Image (spheres, rainbow, N blue to C red):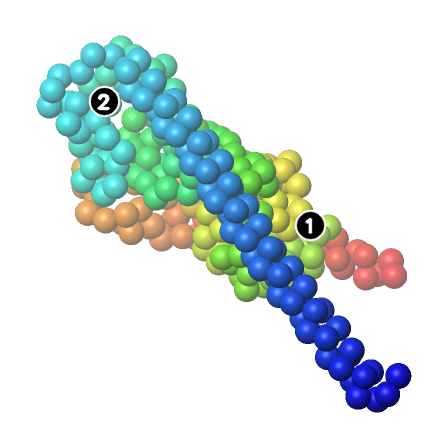
Amino acid sequence: MSSDGRSGCSQIWAAERSGECNEKVENEERNQSEQTWMYLIYIGAIFLLAVGLLLMVYLKFPKMSSSDKEKFKLPKTLDDAKELGRVLSNYKDDFFLQVVFGFMVVYIFLNAFAIPGSIFLSILSGFLFPFPLALFLVCLCTSIGSSLCYVISAAVGKKLVMKYFPQRVNEWQKHVEHHRKDLLNYIIFLRITPFLPNWFINITSPVLNVSLWPFFLGTFIGVAPPSFGFISAGFELYELTATGDAFSFKSITLIVIAAIVSLLPVVFRRRVQQKLE
């Protein structure tokens, strides 16, 4: 075969190969788009189920007056939290379990779907319940809600996370691998400090293969110090003018000390390991 013939065959083969590659890329993009929509549909279905549960809690709540019904809503501002506190305080003594259960369901819902408002509920818990119970409820509800967010992300959201937060995920991946042997302490430290938003930790942890148990336990322990200030502020709910008022010198000191303490086991283990080596 002449060189011109071979050249012509090569060009035809290259054109066919290019066409196949373009078609393959288009098919992959189409499949990714369809998968994205499927993930969004799944998340929407789970969200609607959770809203249905909230509606059941609302319908099962004791009968309220028309004025109380207007104030019985998810708090979006500190004023909303104050109004809701007034309403719930009217029913807390006679329907304590219903109030506790309703508080837990709403708190878990907000954390599970990364909806703002849990700070106001933390403040409200200090107003409604004794401090030990309020702290336990906040830690438990945050842990359960965050774990549900973790499960949702693990089930249907991994590709969405990588698609919309690739740079931040890659950056955190390095830190997770560096602390792989001390994940529990690392999660506690992250929950105590404001370096990463809680919603980001929730949705990216399954992507980075953070196990659910250290995630749950680290969240339960780690949210306690920051919650201390918000719950304590709830004792004087009606004197607060902004959520920032919750952070007194005492609460900030507690957060700093707790963050340092969470790292001490890691430092100790690494020094012992260095000496053994």
**What residue sits 68% from the left and 73% below the top?**
15
Q: Position of residue 198 (x, y in %)?
A: 47, 48
Q: Taking 33 as reference, is 230 above or below it?
A: above
Q: What label does residue 89 carry, if any?
A: 2
- Mark 1 or 2 closer to N-term? 2
Q: Position of residue 157 (x, y in %)?
A: 54, 44
- The amino acid marked with disc number 2 is Ser
**What residue sits 69% from the left and 50% below the top?**
182
Q: Kindly tell me whether residue 44 is visible in this rendering.
A: yes
To which quarter of the image does residue 17 belong?
bottom right
Q: Secondary structure at mark 1?
A: helix
- Whole-angstrom CA distance, mark 1 to mark 2, is 43 Å
Q: Taking 163 as reference, is 183 above or below it?
A: above
Give 120 or 28, whichever is nearer the viewer. Answer: 28
Q: What label does residue 182 carry, if any?
A: 1
Badge 2: how crowded within 10 Å, few (<14), some, or many (20+)?
Answer: some
